[in-house]
């Protein structure tokens, strides 16, 4: 077993100052407060059996007032926020067919950048994070997420509307329901709803045309303040979304789809602390019908770079702030109970490389009769996040979910969220058939995902945290991917 070497206070403080991760003094308009750095370095300590709360800015990801409109929703443009080093630009990315309307519709790419060399590309197609470029400890840049180069590649390969052997969902905004719903069915509003079967015998990530298959519209102007750069994208999902007649793919007896119209806004922002914030807002527009909602982002990370050597992700360290996980049956639906990670390959409370135990199929999994690593062909499970404490509280009051880092480059990722779970997926079904944005072929060990979420199959598991959104109600949620080196 391998364990991480934690930074000492001196090296941590140097990293905080270099990457701009310290709390900001409001009187200095963005300059780093020396007092905040010292206090932060002094209070950073190990928790949950080895997890260290990463240094973050408590105000870096907060919503800014006075956002200015730099570009309309249908024209390309760019904006730079004063001399803060933050900028955003918008470029036409191509036309494709919008499934809701059947019409050819333009798509756009938004590029967010900060003063420290972090650059994020976001697509209006699928609300997709296409790339995230992050400098290493010696300044060397790398794109740390998997993705495709062209719109045509995303349409053809990312989540094609098929009932088997679907795509990888690279970078997509997932909805209405992220993860699996058993049998593609659930009961709500006094009736049974049915969804397309697109993953074995289950519904996965919303169905044949989930949110990642749609073209999102820009809301308002580009966000270009002194504290953040970003954009808000919107999708209106109709009542009966993913309904299909009998005999349709995945709907042998017909599918009702999801109840209620749902309006979803996702705001992506980047700050000078290296924090990429994703803020979700979902409004149930129906005055009578409740619905179920589970939104997440499906980016695959590789902190060595998406074009790094084959299998490089397996040599990267991961920690997860979770003492329990939800083991699954043979169809990858949770068995309905929370199992301890102690004594299993699922214990990431202390740091391990991804590959150090991924093939230990003879291990104990605290799930008698079900070999978890064989079922999923690696890690593809929901970890039950530990309750937030003072030591695991990050920006916006979010809870620490996970950390990952590449020892060679020094690039690190910290995941903060308000969700109760995180699906850690080790890219088990990447099989060499997909070519990425750099021309690299993606295989197992190319990347991994941290899907912050409510639990899989929650609509059919009353003991799990509820995913029901009542008629007329609003859901808000935030996840932050914080990058440093």
Image (cartoon, rainbow, N blue to C red):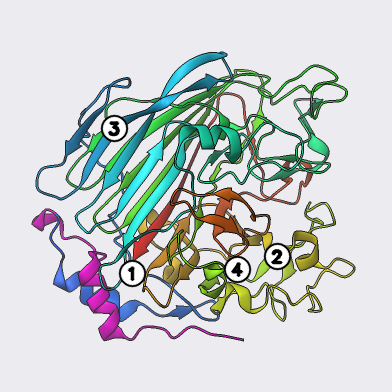
> Disc 2 on helix, strand or loop?
loop
Residue receiving disc 3:
90
Region of the chain picked out in magenta, as a range = 1-29
Compared to 234, does 286 lie above or below?
A: above
Tell me the quadrant of the picture where the C terminus can be found: bottom left
| Figure quadrant of residue 258 | top right
| 13 drawn magenta | yes
Label 2 or label 1, whichever lies nearer to me, is 2
Q: Which mark is residue 55?
A: 1
Q: Is residue 292 left or right of residue 172?
A: right
> Disc 4 on helix, strand or loop?
loop
Measured in 3D between alpha carbons, the distance from the residue under mark 2 to the one under mark 1, in whole angstroms, is 30 Å
Along the polypeptide, which appears first: circle 3 or circle 4?
Answer: 3
Local packing at callout 3 (Cα closer than 10 Å; few below 14, some 14-19, many 20+) is many
Local packing at callout 4 (Cα closer than 10 Å; few below 14, some 14-19, many 20+) is many
Along the polypeptide, which appears first: circle 3 or circle 1?
Answer: 1
Q: Which mark is residue 322?
A: 4
Measured in 3D between alpha carbons, the distance from the residue under mark 4 to the one under mark 1, in whole angstroms, is 19 Å
Along the polypeptide, which appears first: circle 4 or circle 1?
Answer: 1
Q: Which mark is residue 395?
A: none
Local packing at callout 2 (Cα closer than 10 Å; few below 14, some 14-19, many 20+) is many
Along the polypeptide, which appears first: circle 2 or circle 3?
Answer: 3
């Amino acid at each position: 077993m391998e364990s991480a070497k934690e930074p000492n206070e001196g090296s941590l403080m140097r990293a905080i100052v270099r990457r701009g991760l310290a709390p900001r003094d409001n009187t200095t308009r963005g300059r780093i407060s020396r007092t905040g750095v010292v206090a932060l370095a002094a209070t950073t300590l190990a928790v949950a059996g080895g997890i260290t709360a990463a240094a973050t800015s408590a105000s870096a990801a907060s919503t800014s007032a006075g956002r200015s409109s730099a570009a309309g929703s249908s024209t390309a443009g760019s904006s730079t926020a004063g001399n803060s080093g933050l900028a955003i630009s918008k470029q036409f990315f191509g036309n494709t067919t919008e499934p809701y309307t059947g019409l050819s519709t333009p798509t756009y790419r938004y590029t967010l950048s900060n003063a420290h060399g972090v650059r994020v590309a976001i697509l209006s197609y699928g609300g997709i994070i296409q790339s995230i470029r992050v400098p290493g400890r010696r300044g060397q840049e790398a794109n740390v997420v998997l993705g495709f180069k062209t719109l045509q590649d995303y349409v053809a390969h990312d989540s094609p509307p098929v009932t088997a052997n679907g795509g990888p969902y690279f970078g997509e905004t997932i909805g209405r329901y992220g993860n699996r719903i058993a049998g593609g069915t659930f009961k709500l509003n006094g009736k049974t709803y049915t969804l397309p079967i697109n993953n074995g015998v289950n519904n996965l990530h919303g169905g044949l045309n989930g949110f990642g298959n749609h073209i999102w519209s820009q809301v308002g102007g580009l966000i270009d303040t002194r504290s953040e750069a970003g954009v808000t994208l919107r999708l209106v999902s109709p009542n009966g979304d993913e309904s299909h007649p009998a005999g349709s793919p995945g709907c042998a007896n017909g599918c009702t789809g999801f109840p209620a119209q749902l309006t979803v806004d996702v705001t992506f922002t980047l700050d000078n602390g290296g924090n990429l914030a994703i803020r979700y807002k979902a409004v149930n527009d129906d005055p009578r019908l409740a619905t179920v909602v589970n939104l997440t982002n499906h980016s695959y990370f590789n902190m060595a770079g998406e074009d790094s050597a084959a299998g490089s992700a397996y040599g990267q360290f991961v920690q997860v702030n979770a003492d329990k996980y939800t083991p699954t049956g043979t169809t990858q639906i949770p068995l309905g109970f929370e199992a301890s990670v102690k004594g299993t390959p699922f214990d990431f409370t202390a740091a391990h490389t991804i590959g150090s135990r991924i093939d230990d199929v003879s291990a104990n999994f605290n799930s008698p009769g079900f070999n978890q690593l064989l079922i999923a062909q690696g890690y593809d499970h929901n970890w039950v996040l530990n309750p937030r404490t003072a030591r695991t509280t990050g920006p916006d009051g979010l809870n620490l979910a996970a950390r990952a880092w590449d020892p060679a480059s020094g690039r690190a990722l910290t995941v903060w969220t308000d969700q109760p779970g995180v699906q850690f997926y080790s890219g088990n079904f990447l099989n060499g058939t997909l070519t990425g944005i750099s021309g690299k072929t993606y295989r197992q060990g190319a990347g991994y995902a941290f899907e912050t979420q409510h639990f899989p199959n929650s609509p059919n598991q009353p003991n799990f945290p509820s995913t029901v959104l009542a008629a007329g109600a609003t859901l808000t949620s935030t996840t932050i991917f914080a990058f440093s080196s």
